[in-house]
Amino acid sequence: MEQLVQQIEAYKQEINLFDAKTPEAVEEFRIKYLGTKGLVKSVMGEMKNVPNEQKKAFGQVLNEFKLFAENKYESLKENHQPEADSHQQIDWSLPGDPIAAGTRHPLSIVRNQIVSIFKRLGFAVAEGPEIEDDWHNFGAMNLPEDHPARDMQDTFYISQNPAWLLRTHTSSVQARVMESQKPPIRVICPGRVYRNETISARAHCFFHQVEGLYIDDNVSFADLKQTLYFFVQEMFGKNVKVRFRPSYFPFTEPSAEMDISCLICGGDGCNICKHTGWVEILGSGMVHPKVLDNFGIDSNKYTGFAFGMGVERITQLKFQVNDLRLYSQNDVRFLKQFTGVI
Ligand code: PHE
């Protein structure tokens, strides 16, 4: 027994000094010490020759020896693992994992396009708060408290007295611009607006607008028409037809709505254009003198035009989206169709 213990000590020394430079040497180590005919097995075979009263003590020595050899083997393996692994497990000929490209939201794409067209005409971008007071959203825009046209825009009120509300149009931003700037004024106001409407394929309680305002001397209705005509051609192409219809807005006089020939059916008549061949895309008009006066802009000297359009509607026509709810449901199957569209 004494002798055996010494022998084991000697093996341990040997193991300690063992250095494997290659994976083959690691394998050699395994065969020599841990293999079925290895040294660990063979000293274990000596157990039967050890007297009974010493078996327990010798068993401990053996276990320790086995662990010692196994630990060494693990550490040798570790040193050679990475190289061995990368060659064995990675198949470099397989295609890589696809990286899903992010997409811009269709409303952002179209808003950016609208903004960039008007920027080329010299319009600057103006922004304002979504929570507004009554004055900027209504009062200043020639909609006094009892004005029936307030019913046109079902308003979400946050408080009654003083009245705070979610803006119903970005005309409120025009009001803020006229309040703080002197003519010439040439701005577009993109932003989210809110109206208390039941959510359906055709209506939503929030949507997006781009409104525009141009005030200077001698701004005429002809300028309005030409500007909007240019916009439509840039947005939808040269073949689209345009028509203006007289309309009413409290903040413009005269007012007009603009229709374009239906892009879905080419004017023949379909569900989108309700079989008329035309779709309305914006409201517009010459800024009402009262609105100018509200901001101390001399309405005898200056004139201006304003317009407002819904980004959802333009996007619907551009990308043939037939349900407004798709815009806010975050369904990837919908959103990923716009991959790569800038
Ligand atoms: N503010 C109007 C709306 O939200 C749009 C509009 C703006 C109409 C400017 C005329 C002039 O419906």
Image (spheres, rainbow, N blue to C red):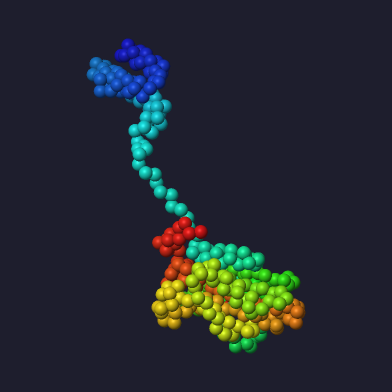
114 over 252 or under it: above or below = above
Residue at 70%, 83% (x, y): give it: 290
- Residue 197: % across, % down: 50, 78
From this viewpoint, is residue 25 visible?
yes
- Please name whichever residue, 64 or 208, is drawn nearer the observer in this view of the structure: 208
Q: Quadrant of residue 29?
A: top left
- Please name whichever residue, 137 or 339, is drawn nearer the observer in this view of the structure: 339
14 over 75 or under it: above or below = above
Residue at 62%, 80% (x, y): give it: 285
Q: Quadrant of the N terminus?
A: top left
- Residue 185: % across, % down: 70, 71
Q: Count the numbered circles shown.
A: 0
Extreme-left residue of the structure: 48
Residue at 75%, 79% (x, y): give it: 301
From this viewpoint, is residue 137 visible?
no
Q: Quadrant of residue 277?
A: bottom left
- Please name whichever residue, 41 or 3, is drawn nearer the observer in this view of the structure: 41
* 319 left or right of 38 in image: right
